Image: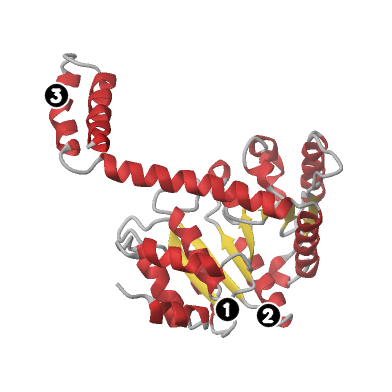
Amino acid sequence: MNYNNLLENIFKNDKRSVSRAISIIESENSNSTELLKELHQRIGRAYRIGITGPPGAGKSTLTNQLTKYYRKQNKTVGIIAVDPTSPFTGGALLGDRVRMSEIGIDPGVFIRSMATRGSLGGLSKKTIDAADVLDAAGYNFIIFETVGVGQSELDVAKAADTTIVVLVPESGDSIQAMKAGLMEIADFFVLNKSDRPGAESAVTALKTILMMREHSEKTWLPNILKAVASENIGTVDIALEIEKHSLFLEQNGLLKEKRELNYKARIKEIVEYLIKNELWKEDRAAKLQESLSKVTEGKTSPYQIAETLLNDFKSTLKE
């Protein structure tokens, strides 16, 4: 399939073409890989921001305010709101797009809701592919706003240059439990709804955890910012902290290093995905099904079946 016209229009930031390209990627169209290969020559200019945290922390409101701030700076923003997969359609729920209707009509803003499709990290690999489309279209900032399911929200750090973890004063009691996962990916924290009781104790709990981190001269120390996103309080400070972190990464040669690590993880995931698809081609899925009764009856082991299937796969590679 010839994607020349589509690519040309994406590079011109034609929203309809951008939307069509993301739909092709989401549907896993057989030609989507070729499209992504062609797009890659034009990506790397957008700055990618991940916004994550527990449900109800106000991530969508913060995304909304941050986007309005960037638009006042005459910067364009692409937003990927990563929603839970709908149990009925398999698509993304549109709650975030409804909440962001105020900025949705802005010609310098593109919003897309995407399903997690069962990805434990909260970001499906198609989400990162979609970000590449927005990058190629020339958006200055790409914001990933994730579903916010606690420990499983770690994939955002593999996609973003700066990761923001949004918490609320009520998170104070659970911060200790979060530290093994979600807490460690934050480049800085935003304590939203900080006008509520318990804000100071939550800040103290965060500072206690951060003091335990090892750091050197080239280590970025996460800050803790207070905000009341619903009243647009703290938005400027958050934007300045993103800029400060970006500058730190650039000056220390860490942005390139971070992106290379992200690409490494992404390439591994793509390779595993391709191998998995190849592995279950032909009649191997049928052979697996036929073997199940033997495993259940104790006549053979799951490991033996797995080895047989793998050896069968290896034999096709030698042909």
Q: Residue at 53% across / 43% down in the picture? A: 152
**What colour scheme was applied to this rendering of the protein?**
secondary structure
Does residue 246 appear to the left or right of 92 in the view shown? right
Q: Is residue 116 left or right of residue 28?
A: right
Amino acid type of disc 1? Val
Q: Is residue 93 left or right of residue 305?
A: right
**Residue bearing the label numbered 2:** 71
Closer-to-camera residue (312/56): 312
Q: Amino acid at mark 3?
A: Ser
Dot 2: what SS?
helix
Q: Position of residue 29 (x, y in %)?
A: 31, 63
Dot 2 or dot 3: first in sequence order is: 2
Q: Which amino acid does the dot numbered 2 rest on?
A: Arg
Q: Residue furthest top?
A: 299
Element type where label 3 sits in the image: helix
Which part of the image, by quadrant, shows the C terminus?
Answer: top left
Mark drawn on residue 293: 3
Front residue of this view, candidates 314 and 59: 314
Q: Nearer the viewer, residue 185 or 158?
A: 158
Q: Residue at x 40, y 48 (%)?
A: 118
Q: Residue at x 45, y 68 (%)?
A: 38
Cβ atoms at labels 1 and 2 below 8 Å apart:
yes
Q: Quadrant of residue 191?
A: bottom right
The image shows residue 289, relative to residue 9, as above or below, that is: above
Mark 1 lies on residue: 109
Q: Residue furthest front?
A: 319
